[in-house]
Image (tube, coloured by chain):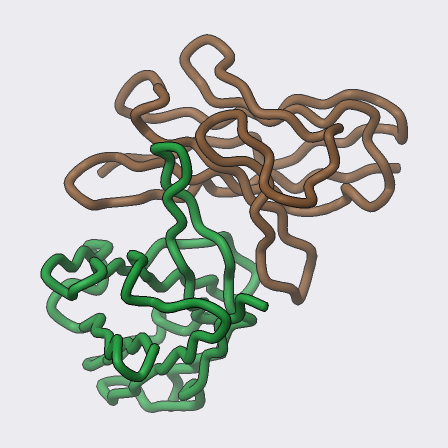
Amino acid sequence: DVQLAESGGGLVQPGGSLRLSCAASGFTISNYWMGWVRQAPGKGLEWVANIKQDGSEKYYVDSVKGRFTISRDNAENSLFLQMNRLRAEDTAVYYCVRWQYISGWYSIDPWGQGTLVTVSS
Amino acid sequence: QTVVTQEPSFSVSPGETVTLTCGLSSGSVSTRNHPSWYQQTPGRAPRTLIYGTNIRSSGVPDRFSGSMLGDKAALTITGAQADDDSDYYCLLYVGSGIWVFGGGTKLTVL
């Protein structure tokens, strides 16, 4: 069964740091682009970052550039998101996602269950 | 900054057909944007419905279909059921490695 399990969320003060982890099972992440999507309380989905299979390419939404770093450990079948200089507006559920590529089309599948990050003093 | 547009809300009666759309502030949506659609119920992770404009994900009922409608991507639910009462999001590739979700459509079936 293909699954993604996030961990590392919690309460952090503004300006602080947090590292999210995502453990994949049922497939080998080295074959896939991976990413993070977040959802602020009561708001819509926002794509945050993607990383290529070998880590050679990384892309970010403008609002997190320079503060967040996506990385992966293919040997451990895990994905990470290092979040620095956190702001109140980063408060959200963070979903770990796999990018599937089928018949020439990219989409997200599956999604993890999410981990809540709360930035507050 | 590219904005992906969706209707904020829709209300339908059970058995009716509804079409949700997904547009781009910068112009027309095309298949090059890799349109995909996701369903989310409160408190749960999203579920993938449609990718590649019109390909149903595994296990998705055939009452869900995707298409291009003019300059927008579209999701049609034919014969809406109570279980379809959810939020629906489209996702588009806008170039240079960047992806953008629409603001979501809250569909009420009653």
- Vertical arrangement, residue A83 with respect to residue A43, above or below: below
Q: Nearer the viewer, residue A21 or A115?
A: A21
Count all numbered tags in the image, as a single digit. 0
Q: Nearer the viewer, residue A16 or B75?
A: B75
Residue B78 point in image, percent of width and height: 77, 23
Drawing shade for chain A: green
Q: Nearer the viewer, residue A1 or B50?
A: A1
Residue B103 point in image, percent of width and height: 48, 42
- Vertical arrangement, residue A36 with respect to residue A74, above or below: above
**Which image quadrant: the C terminus of chain A?**
bottom left
Drawing shade for chain B: brown
Residue A10 point in image, percent of width and height: 44, 89
Residue reaching furthest to the top: B70
Q: Residue at x 35, y 54 (%)?
A: A47
Which image quarter: residue B27? top left
**Which image quadrant: the N terminus of chain A?**
bottom right
Q: Residue at x 11, y 68 (%)?
A: A66
As drawn, is A64 to the left or to the right of B80?
left
Q: Nearer the viewer, residue A24 or A8?
A: A24
